[in-house]
Structures are given as C-alpha cells and as structure tokens.
Amino acid sequence: MTHLFVVAGIHIVNGRLLLARRPLTGDLPGLWELPGGKVEPGETPAEALVRELQEELGVVAVGPEPYAFRTVTHGERRLTLLFLAIRGILGTPRPLECLSVRQATRAEAPLLSLAPPDRDIVERLVAEGFRDTETVETPRLLERAREEGAYVFGSESLGEEPLTFVKRRDGRITRGLLVRTSQGPAAYENTCPHVPIPLDRDGESLLSEDGRHLVCNNHGALFDRETGLCVSGPCAGERLRPIPIAPEGDGVRLLP
C-alpha cells in the first residue's frame, strides 16, 4: 500500500470559504475540496501548500498554521491529510489546474458535493462559526510576502501608469518600477541617478503629460520609458538601472 502525505488549505475571509472543484477526470471527479495537494520529498507541509496553491489557483498563501489532520484509505493508497489554516492570500484565485473555484458561505458549503475527507472539516468549521482565518497579523504577513517573492503583484493588470514595488533581493531592499513599453513590460530600479532617492513622491504621477517619459517628481528629470535613458534634467545621459524580469502567468517575476 502506498502512503501519501497531503496538505489542504483553509481560507475563510468575510465568512466565505475558498473551495476548488476537481477536474472531471481522475480521482473524485467534479467534487469540491479544500485546495492543496501532495507533499513532495524535501518539502515541509507549509512549503507544499504554498506551491500547490500557486500552481492550482495562481495565488500565494501566507501564514499557514496546522488546523487538523485525518488519515484515510483510498483504494491502494493510505493518505495522511494535514489541513492548514491560511492567514492571508496574495492574488485572486483562478482555476489553473482545477475546474472552477468559489467562495462558499457557511450556509452553502455543507450543501456542495464535497470530497469525503473535506466534508468532516467543513462541518467542523460550520460548527465553530465559520470564523475568518485572517488575523490582525495578516497585513504584515502579506506585505512581507510581497517583498520576498519574485512575482510582482499587480503586474498582471499593468496599465499606463507605472507600478512601483519593493522586493528583498540578495539581502538588500530593491525599490522598482514596472512600466509598459512597445516590447512589453520593463522594470527599472526606482532610484534617480542624480540623487539616489525614489522618483515617486506623494502619489504624483510618474508619467509626463504626453505619456512618453517617466518623471522624477523630485528633480524634474525625464526618462525614456523604453530604455530608461534620461533625456532631460540634471542627470541627462544617464540611465535608470534595469531589473531583469520574465513572464509568469499573466504577470512578471524578477529574475535572480
């Protein structure tokens, strides 16, 4: 008999539980479940849950904490399932490797066709009042996750206005700008070559009126958004330092 270790995430916010519907092929076709999957060799349960939710739903789970475990036998497999309460999620869940996703209320969740191991957990959550899993620590955890992950959150909906971001890279803080160019998104360090301070200030736009240039709101320098070259101002001829990026899903991630 094969023994598998599986994790599943419990995320309730504003009284709604995140559920994923299994594909119509394979085990338990079409049933609703708490999202998760198998723990791979060398992974901790928390690491496995973060990876599975990123692959399955395109989100980053933060602050997972043990909630309950079950051991079940399914055919020739013995499953140990660890259910983890998730204290926050970055991104909007979407069905990448499942049929669909939904946010079910306390009244709706028990009425769905749930995978058998998950039904007991959902009934327990209902009995306990369907309490939100997010806490007062959630904003801090989410901010830290934004900084530490390679994915640039918000890049999937990048508009004309540049997107500012902060990342921890190689033991230091990197402040960046993500901009649209004719060749796709480009990223630069958010540091003016004239004086090493960020280009943005007090919520002012980082674009010139004609939309062709990035503007340093502190010194008035103009930078070509396509190349990062300063074309006007006290640092004319110098460039914003580029940050290497690569596509990831609908957005981008920073390269090492």
Image (spheres, rainbow, N blue to C red):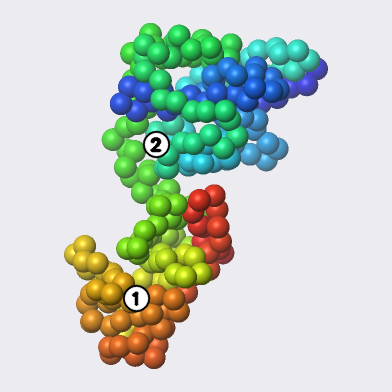
Residue pointed to by mark 1: 212
Label 1's element? loop
Mark 2: amino acid: Gly
Q: Is residue 242 left or right of residue 4?
A: left
Q: Can residue 163 be seen at all in this image of the molecule?
A: yes
Q: Is residue 179 left or right of residue 80?
A: left
Quarter of the image with the N terminus is top right
Residue 68 placement (x, y as % from top left): 51, 19
Quadrant in the picture for residue 139: top left
Residue pointed to by mark 2: 88
Please give the name of the residue rendered at 52% of the width and 28% of the height, measured from the top-left corner. 100
Q: Relative to 188, is 255 above or below?
A: above
Residue 248 placement (x, y as % from top left): 55, 53
Quarter of the image with the C terminus is bottom right
Residue 96 placement (x, y as % from top left): 57, 37
Q: Can residue 83 be seen at all in this image of the molecule?
A: no
Please give the name of the residue rendered at 61% of the width and 29% of the height, measured from the top-left corner. 37
Q: Nearer the viewer, mark 2 or mark 1?
A: 1
Residue nearest the observer in this picture, 182 or 20:
182
Q: Residue furthest right?
A: 1
Label 1 crowd (10 A; few <14 / some 14-19 / many >=20): some
Q: Is residue 127 left or right of residue 22?
A: left
Please give the name of the residue rendered at 35% of the width and 87% of the height, measured from the top-left corner. 231
Residue 143, numbered circle: none
Quadrant in the picture for residue 82: top right
Q: CA distance from mark 2 to mark 1?
A: 38 Å
Label 2 crowd (10 A; few <14 / some 14-19 / many >=20): many
Quadrant in the picture for residue 247: bottom right
Residue 237 placement (x, y as % from top left): 39, 91
